Image (cartoon, grey):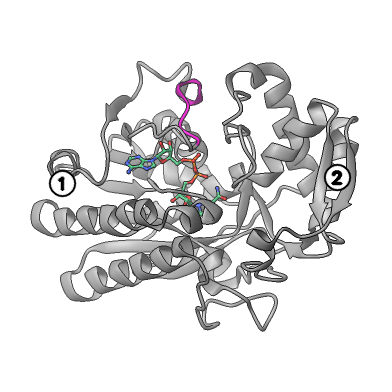
Amino acid sequence: MYDVSAAAGFYHQKNVTITGGMGMIGSNLARALVDFGAKVTIVDAMLSQYGGNHFNISGYEDRLTLLPADIRDKAAVDNFIRDQHLLFNFAAQVSHNDSIEDPWSDAQINYLGHLNVLESARLNNPDVRIIYSGSRLQYGKVTTVPTHESHPLNPETPYAFNKTVAESMYRYYYRLHGINSVMFRITNPYGIRGQMKHSRYGIVNYFIRCAMQQEDISVFGDGSQIRDYIYIDDLVEALIAAGASDSAQGQVMNLGSGRGTSFREMAETVVRVVGSGSVSSIPWPDSYINVETGDFIADITLAREVLGWSPETSLEDGIRRTLQFYQRYGEHYTERA
Ligand SMILES: NC(=O)c1ccc[n+]([C@@H]2O[C@H](COP(=O)([O-])OP(=O)(O)OC[C@H]3O[C@@H](n4cnc5c(N)ncnc54)[C@H](O)[C@@H]3O)[C@@H](O)[C@H]2O)c1
């Protein structure tokens, strides 16, 4: 367990901007940093397909600044990046399936939008520290599990291509221009404040919703594919640690639970914890089988060593906490997209 109280002093009175901060990861982080006394600005374009949700900052509206803006807008980026000590740059098109349907939007946000931010940092605020949220999909099909950061990258969809090239850009700006960055390759996050409108990403949250509504959960094939699910609180602790750490700067790190669970076991755990719903199997749709990456578990040794962090939440506990949140606040999250 990472001692967040050590980081609290670091963040006190720091100017911190979180792009995509109305979504799951950004809003949970924003709330923690506000509690540390950071001066938090959330930048979000509130694109309808994604997880941006005003309820995610409920109770915190007067304690942070919300700036409706898009990272594709150069002038807006130049404006918000000045005077910031830290920038958690999470704005993204988040679905790898959507990136197959609409590769342009993916490139415009996940590649060019991030180039905007890096170029603006170089010109307007070269001392800013940036945290980047890449994806385990950058690895594509892996040959060794658990997968270490040194494993070759074989991205297979536009989402994964753009996450990969954006990570290379962060490394380039760090190396050539001295822009401090920490680059994460995140596995499958889930938990409170995540969207459950659709199943195009954030599948654990979506399955919790299905089970709560006594629906059947369809698992592709036999559901034996292994995934690494990380609960949002563990993820946020790693992000907090990375922002506060000098030795993390310039590092590329996996960020996951380090534990593997089959897809079917995840679905069955959801049904058991929720106490309703059911699990059945359907054949793999072509659109999924063609980009299926096979089993994945993140090797998180580097993040453990560099950040002094370790994930603590079991899948069952994380699902239980998520369920309790949605039992209370689900009405704010269930409009189907
Ligand atoms: N959720 C996952 O499965 C997952 C896995 C690995 C990595 N990530 C990465 O983590 C980051 C955060 O994801 P999340 O799970 O919180 O998703 P989310 O959908 O909950 O949040 C994404 C937010 O980004 C905003 N956004 C999108 N495009 C924008 C733009 N051009 N300008 C400003 N805001 C914009 C959306 O409105 C939304 O509020 C993303 O970079 C994502 O790629 C997510």
Q: Nearer the viewer, mark 1 or mark 2?
A: 1
Q: Which secondary structure, mark 1?
A: helix
**Residue range highlighted in magenta:** 51-56
Report how many numbered discs are placed on residues in the image.
Answer: 2
- Amino acid type at circle 1 is Lys
Q: Position of residue 232 (x, y in %)?
A: 60, 43
Kindly give the residue lying farthest to the left in the view shown.
123
Q: Position of residue 314 (x, y in %)?
A: 77, 49
Q: Is residue 45 above or below residue 117?
A: above
Ligand 1, seen in the image, is in the quarter at top left
Q: Is residue 58 above or below residue 201?
A: above
> Which is more toward the observer, 298 or 222?
222
Determine which quarter of the picture holds residue 173: bottom left
Residue 73 among magenta residues: no
- Amino acid type at circle 2 is Thr
Q: Residue at x 68, y 38 (%)?
A: 205
Q: Which secondary structure, mark 2?
A: helix
Q: Residues within 10 Å of mark 1 (few under 14, many from 20)?
A: some
Q: Residue at x 48, y 38 (%)?
A: 50
> Which is more toward the observer, 96 or 256?
96
Mark 1 and mark 2: Cα distance apart in space: 45 Å
Residue 269: which numbered mark, if any? Answer: 2
Q: Is residue 93 visible?
A: yes
For disc 1, the marked residue is: 74
Q: Residues within 10 Å of mark 2 (few under 14, many from 20)?
A: some
